[in-house]
Image (cartoon, rainbow, N blue to C red):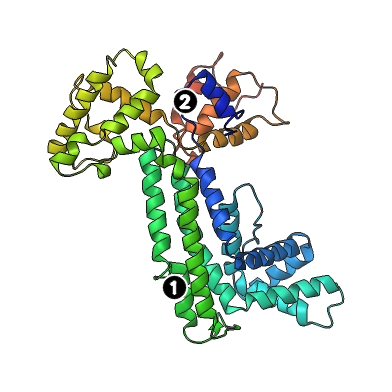
Amino acid sequence: MLGVNNGVTARLQRLCPSLVPIWCVAHRLELVALDSVKQVPQLQDIKQTLRAIHKHYTCSAKASRELEEISKAMEISIVRPGNTEGTRWLPHMSHALEALMRNYRPILMHFENHASDPNDKEASAAMKGRAKLVQQSLKQYKMLLFIHLMLDVLQELKQLSLLFQRDGLTLQMVSDGLQTTTLALVAMQTNPGPRLHQFMEEVGAGSIWQGVQLSRTNADDDTFNALKLCLTNSFCEFVSELFKSLETGVLKATSTLFDLSNWPEDTTNLATFGTAELNAFMEHFHPVLETCENFESVEAARQEWLDLKVLIARHYRHLDSQVQGAIGRDGQFQHMQVIAEISLVLHMSSSCCERGFSSMKRIKSDWRSCLSNEMPNSLLQISVHGPPAQDYDSMKAVTKWWSSGCRARIPHYKD
């Protein structure tokens, strides 16, 4: 896809040299999370435990029924144990950990019964061995510490992933989101997140949590702090590595020009600020700018850039980070308007396309395949760009259907 010589982007750039290849930031975030957690071996123990629990209750209806009976006796509402394997690692891992913590006491009691009941003739030796390993893992204090840390980390990554899946995502929004998440994870090195803080408050200096005696040693806290530091540092390193392309070339020029937080305060630095980036931007998009009616010359664009800096610095520094909304009266900065419009075309995420693929699978299936070309297109537009079902007002559609039929609508009439 992104091969330098024969990838899709390389072939397209031969046809259109001004094309800017951008790797979907939502997918890149998944890889950052995966690469970060690979540096922590303890996560493999958690994944092994989650897989064993998921396999136990997915492959056995009897086990699921027994878990439900235990939860009813304990008056705990349980959810289905989650699977860690899937196309998107973040939501699968987050759901699996949330389900484990919600079902903690019923699952632990169920596996303890399997491991210690000598009268359980139906359970195989492999099942009893798996149950013993799972219940030992769930009773380790350091394991629960790391699970709650992962819940806090995944919550931050979840918010960033939702941001990266928005329509109209801009380069400034990506940079701000990455900075916010990085700062939140760095803060976790010294200040525990909400889930970890609650767990540590409930356990305190003892070793009992939710009525369960945990296996705790004096070295657990020191080991956990080292793991926490390793995880957060790895995340920051992989963010810098996988998102470094956003800080080079025309993307860096776009971010510098249209992000007010980068603008200097003093007049001396403001005079030369952005000139090199503007030249790089115009050089890259020279074939496109030549065909624009509102773009006369490079010299005129440089003069407008100087006028725009004066206008923004004197009157509009309080505005949002998008300079596009600060451009003055009609026709005043026509060259800058062209450059701003090009910057808005740089799409940072392919989430909209993936949602379209999912919508198409729902709309046109094996049971509903005899559709004209116009009908799937209309249904796809409604599914992707239409309002949510709870916000949809059906009165207009019903009124149009009632008044535009080939014959009169007769209620309660059967043909």
Q: Is residue 401 above or below residue 98?
A: above
Residue occupied by mark 1:
197
**For the N terminus, which image quadrant?**
top right
- Residue 101 is left or right of residue 263, and the answer is right
User: Residue sitting at 58 percent across and 18 percent down?
Assistant: 374
Give the label, 2 or 1, closer to the camera. Answer: 2
Q: Earlier in the sequence, mark 2 or mark 1?
A: 2
**For the C terminus, which image quadrant?**
top right
Q: Is 59 in front, or is 238?
A: 238
Name the residue type under label 1.
His
**Considering the numbered disc 1 on the image, is that residue within a helix, a strand or a loop?**
helix
Name the residue type under label 2.
Leu
Gap between marks 2 and 1, in whole Å?
48 Å
Q: Is 118 in front, or is 225?
A: 225
Is residue 411 visible from the viewing direction of this image? no
**Considering the numbered disc 2 on the image, is that residue within a helix, a strand or a loop?**
loop
Q: Is 131 in front, or is 292?
A: 292
Quadrant position of residue 406: top right
x then y, percent, for residue 346: 42, 31
Residue occupied by mark 2:
19
Density class for disc 1 (Cα within 10 Å; few <14, some 14-19, many ≥20) is: some
User: Residue sitting at 47 percent across and 71 percent down?
Assistant: 196
Q: Is residue 218 above or below residue 166?
A: below
- In the rendered structure, are the residues bearing label 2 and label 1 in contact, judged by CB atoms less than 8 Å apart? no
Quadrant position of residue 270: top left
User: Residue sitting at 70 percent across and 22 percent down?
Assistant: 370
x then y, percent, for residue 161: 48, 48
- Residue 353 is left or right of residue 194, and the answer is right
Density class for disc 2 (Cα within 10 Å; few <14, some 14-19, many ≥20) is: some
Is residue 359 visible from the viewing direction of this image? yes
